[in-house]
Image (cartoon, rainbow, N blue to C red):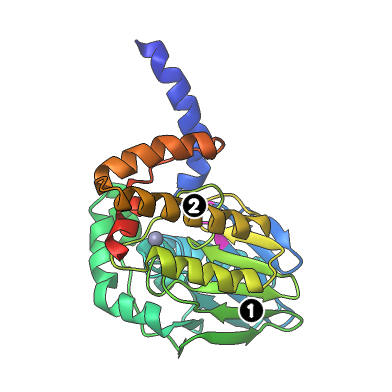
Amino acid sequence: MKLTLLPLAALAAVASAQNQPVLGEDTVKISEHVWAIMGWPNIAIVVGNTATLVVDTGLGPRNGATIARVAAKLAPGNRKLYLTTTHFHPEHAGGEAGFPPNTILIRDAAQQREMEARGQEMIAMFAGRSPQQKELLAGATLRTPDITFDTEAAVDLGGATARLLWFGGAHTKGDLLTFVEPDRTLVSGDVVQNKVVPNIFGDGGTPSSWLAVLDKVQALNVLHVLPDHSAPGDGSMVVMEKQFIGDLRTRALELKQKGVSADDAGKQLGAEFKTRYSDWPNMNVAGFVRSVYAER
Ligand SMILES: [Zn+2]
């Protein structure tokens, strides 16, 4: 019986990089101005001639401090450090306290409202998941941003510009996208991922608002994509995300029309999409199908 555990252990080892909540200092270059620390979640560091922007904090202050150290190493001469967060969940925003005190924190107003309403509650929830997460989240604080914006803020980094964009609700209400020019690199959070079934958190977005966001993303003409919980890729990830959500929504609405229950539709479409998108590692579509059923 022990032998059956071996392949599982091997699989777990392969997947573990993306599940690693203690971030290391190794970086991967995504494009001319963009580096990434790969982990849970992936962190983007955008380096200009005069300023640096970090996207996401990691889980808790210790990870935040690691990222700040890496950012300083990548661009020792840059005197300004900006920080933004893809959404308000603790592994993306709960490490802010680890950054230097003069870090300029900036996020969209929709995300900040979610943070004020539920940020603390989410930190407590994540801390309850394991002793490790509890330890990492010790000392996590949620300070008021220096800058909030409604739909777009352009951060001039010197020779590169990061456009911080709020296109509407998707995974959460406040999903923030970072589009780096001239690289045409999108730091996509959960909004565009690499072969990962989308997930709407609570009353975050809806399947149709997510599709509307993707229409706007498509208009950016993206060349590189760095998602938060999967591997980086090229602009075809945007098309793939749109196709998958559109497909799943269409099929779920057909089954709803026929009177199939949401639970049964989830099971049926899980099997159907496993065949249709055979190279996706996971095909648990039940949650998203429920979101489609709930929408209308
Ligand atoms: Zn999330």
The residue pinned by badge 1 equals: 162
Residue 69, can we see it? yes
The answer to which of marks 1 and 2 sits earlier in the sequence is 1
Indicate the quadrant where residue 186 lies: bottom right
Q: Main secondary structure of the magenta part?
A: loop
Residue closest to the eye, 258 or 195:
258
Residue that mark 2 sits on: 247
**SS for tag 1?**
strand
Quadrant of the displayed image that contains ligand 1: bottom left
Name which residue type carries label 2: Asp
Q: Left or right: where does residue 10 sit relative to residue 45?
A: left
* Residue 5 drawn in magenta: no
Q: Say if disc 2 is inside 8 Å of ligand 1.
A: no
* Image position, residue 217 (x, y; %): 59, 70
Q: Position of residue 128 (x, y in %)?
A: 22, 53
Q: Quadrant of residue 140?
A: bottom left
Residue 282 showing in the rendered view: no
Label 1 is placed on what type of residue?
Ala
Position above or below: 36 against 76: above
- Closest to the camera, between mark 1 and mark 2, is 2
Left or right of residue 49, residue 267 in this image: left
Q: Magenta segment, which residues?
A: 39-43
Q: Quadrant of the N terminus?
A: top left
At 50% from the left and 26% from the top, the residue drawn is 10
Q: Residue furthest front?
A: 258
Q: Nearer the viewer, residue 220 or 233?
A: 220
Number of numbered discs present?
2
Q: Residue at x 43, y 40 (%)?
A: 283
Within-10-Å neighbours for mark 2: few <14, some 14–19, many 20+: few
Real-space CA distance between mark 1 and mark 2, rounded to the nearest whole angstrom? 32 Å
